[in-house]
Amino acid sequence: MSFSYSGFDISGKAVSGAIDAGAHAEAIEALRRRGIFAVQVQEEAGRASGASRTARASRSGGKVTLRELSQFFRQLSILVATKTPLVQALDAIEKQSPEGSLRSILADIRRRVEQGEAFSTALAAHPRAFDPICRSMVAAGESAGLLDQMLKSLAALARQQMNVRRSVVGALTYPAILITVSIGVVIVLLVSVLPQFQELFDSLQTPLPPTTEFLIFISEILRGYWYAIAPGAVVLIIATVLWLKSDSGWALLDTALLRTPRFGPVRRSFAQAGLTRLLGTLLESRVNLLDALRLTRESLTSAAYVNLLLRCEASVEKGQPLAESIGDPDLISPSVKEAIASGERSGQIGPVLLQIADFLDEDNEQFLKMLSALIEPIVLTIMGILVGGVAISMFLPMFDLAANAGGGPAK
């Protein structure tokens, strides 16, 4: 909402103007922080300012990407390190940002900082864009006078998370494309090509191999009930995606992955890398251990590791060492536990956790490269066998007929 005001500044000069705030009391408080003694503050009737509309839109808008966050924190850290005032730095980044959610969010944050709010408080107005870890690290940087270092750490954290996500997506994209194309080819063969062969088979009146009869049966189902199969497949895919996005669905899938013989160690390695990097970054940012454990827990997506940190918080609160509290052999590798214990003894737990995260990320990246190189020929082989099997089953009756016709006169 926009409020018009009139009053006096600290020098006694009469001033008037307009200010954006969520409520009448907030407007008075914002003016007080500016050094203005308000005599009259009233809402401007009949309109909401463009600024307040932008603020509301940004609060309800979508999340910003990790790439945008990384660039924002990196640019802001450079400007703050060069002693640029925070408002001017935010204004510069806002002006060069493309139209979208981030620009609207930056505009609202800049206005809040101009009105006297702390930077971390302004970030808290946009929880979908800035998670508790961002806000806590910024608050720690503000209180310690190390805001530029905290922003640099946040930029590195966002960049690392982006690289991990990019590696996983890159390793799975090509096999997914191969599988999709192969399934499409098989469906086209069954729906468009096989019916033409079926007419030929009927005219020849020859016995068909079991595989050919099975393909004809599948083809008849696809052609006869496509109006139910196609929407059903779409609904099934959407329902599966929504279920996986739900807490119960993702928890069930994550538990299954952790218990799978081949994929369990990989899932644990990725989860440990994320946990140690978040926890190490927070501890290096001078966040106390209990708060760091809580913030890390709130940022994790694995139910098993969330429960692990809940138990760890309770143990640490009772005075237990972190290594003993977090040392679940089913979730934390013995080497990681020993490294944490060594970091505790030396008083360098933050750097040790970050070193563990670097090692695990490098190991995971190598695994993804190996998996990508291994899975592509496997998928190609399976899809080749599938498509080739369909093609052979279609032509097999023709081969049998030609063989019988060629062997008849010789008898």
Image (cartoon, rainbow, N blue to C red):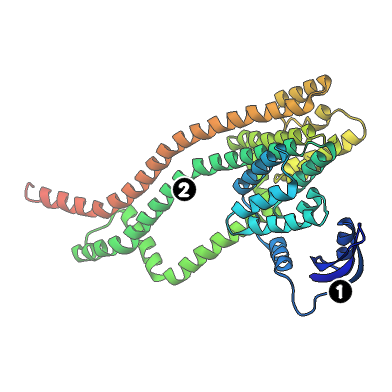
Q: Work out whether residue 331 can be spotted.
A: no
- Which dot, 1 or 2, sits closer to the camera? 1
Give coordinates of residue 150: x percent, y percent.
74, 38
The three-letter amino acid code for the residue at tag 1 is Gln
Give the SS element for disc 1: strand
Q: Is residue 402 left or right of residue 18?
A: left
Measured Cα–Cα span from mark 1 to mark 2: 59 Å
In this rendering, would 390 be left or right of 96? left
| 277 relative to 406, above or below | above
- Image x and y of residue 313, in percent: 85, 38
Q: Is residue 51 left or right of residue 227?
A: right
In the rendered view, would you say 169 is above or below 116?
A: above
Identify the disc placed on residue 176: 2
Q: Nearer the viewer, residue 147 or 223?
A: 147
Total number of numbered discs in the rendering: 2
Q: Residue furthest left?
A: 409
* Quarter of the picture holding the N terminus: bottom right
Residue at 78% over, 55% down: 114
| Tag of residue 326 | none
Q: Quadrant of residue 165?
A: top right
Examine the image and state in which quarter residue 77 appears.
top right
Instruction: Identify residue type, mark 2.
Output: Ala
Q: Nearer the viewer, residue 17 or 104?
A: 17
- Asked if residue 40 lies left or right of residue 216, the reply is right
Q: Residue at x 73, y 70 (%)?
A: 49
Where does residue 258 sit, x and y in percent of width and height?
A: 66, 39
Residue drawn where x is 79% and y is 39% of the image = 141
Q: Position of residue 67 (x, y in %)?
A: 60, 46
Q: Give the labeled residue for mark 1.
A: 42
User: Label 2's element?
Assistant: helix
